[in-house]
Amino acid sequence: MADAKPLLRALGGEAVWPPPMWLMRQAGRYLPEYREVRAQAGGFIALCTNPAMAAEVTLQPIRRYGMDGAILFSDILMVPWALGQPLRFAEGEGPVLEPLRDLAAVNALELNAVRERVAPILETVRRVREAVDAQHPKTALIGFAGSPFTVACYMVEGHGSRDFATTRQMAFTDPALFGKLIRTLVEATTEYLLAQAEAGAEALMLFDSWAGLLPPSQFRRWVIEPTATIVRHLKRLHPSIPIIGFPRLAGPLIGEYALRTGVNTVAMDTSMDPRFAASAVAPTVGLQGNLDPLALIAGGGALEAEARQILAAMRGRPFVFNLGHGIEKVTPPEHVAALVRIVRSGG
């Protein structure tokens, strides 16, 4: 096990120290080399579905910082796109989808087309895996998807939102319709993640960015239960692949999420007290997180103090250092390099 990749050791339940690290959105707009590729791509969906370009931007932070994890460059909304829901990314506006509000729209989703439509993304996975194995043998490739509730938020609303009120209202007033959408997403997401694993992903992550909008009863129904179903299906076919779950803003429900979903590691958001998470989550389940991205922008003493507090709270248990949310585009790359040095020192 000592010769295995550090990230896979930690995700497998080993208390590796110094902990392995990677950053959410590490392949992104804060890097000048990313912006160069993005300008050539002609559009965000075009970039996600161009294997050469997507593989290149996935690998950029690995070359620059030597991260322990390379996360596939893609987007959680590639699943609704693969299901046939019209999607575009408007400059300065974010994702725009054709809102899904009735049974006819759910029935029109094309589950049988998912594998074919994500084929370019799977080719990216193959290219990145080949590259990390050849050039960065200690780096593990992470595949990912959005969790059903969070993806449903965008599909129903048709765009980003502060509260996704229309989606939450549908879950209360028409649980049969919303449940059918969630079941469709469970099936599509499972298929997509299985395909990523077959293409070479060594770990998988489920992002539930809007989980914390729900009250406990709805959290259990629309976050925990669908996630547990996906994990169960994935583990049946790939029992050894580690799975990371990110139930953002889960608060005190983080322990129940860890217990009932079956994920190997739970990612903590920025608001989570690592010491609380360490007490709420079984020691056999890893934790990941949870530096505030604004501390990374600040740099200097503030960055060092925040990072060392997290390291101190996590020492002695399976842990992966990360942010508590995605890296911001104004982050100075040299601050990321400084964070790598702090984490590599072990605090």
Image: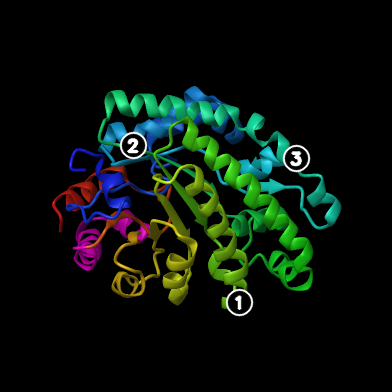
Res. 132 in view: yes
User: Whole-percent x and y of residue 83?
Assistant: 71, 41
Q: Nearer the viewer, mark 2 or mark 1?
A: 1
Res. 159 in view: no
Q: Is residue 315 magenta?
A: yes
Which one is in front, 298 or 119? 119
Quadrant in the rendering for residue 220: bottom right
- Residue pointed to by mark 2: 61
Quadrant in the rendering for residue 346: bottom left
SS label for mark 1: helix
Task: Tell which circle, 2 or 3, labels the residue nearer the N-terminal end.
Answer: 2
Task: Tell which circle, 3 or 1, labels the residue nearer the N-terminal end.
Answer: 3
- Residue pointed to by mark 1: 217
Residue at the image position 26 percent from the left and 40 percent from the top: 5
SS label for mark 2: helix
User: Whole-percent x and y of residue 315?
Assistant: 19, 63
- The type of residue carrying mark 1 is Ser
Query: Magenta stretch?
Result: 292-316
Q: Is residue 200 magenta?
A: no
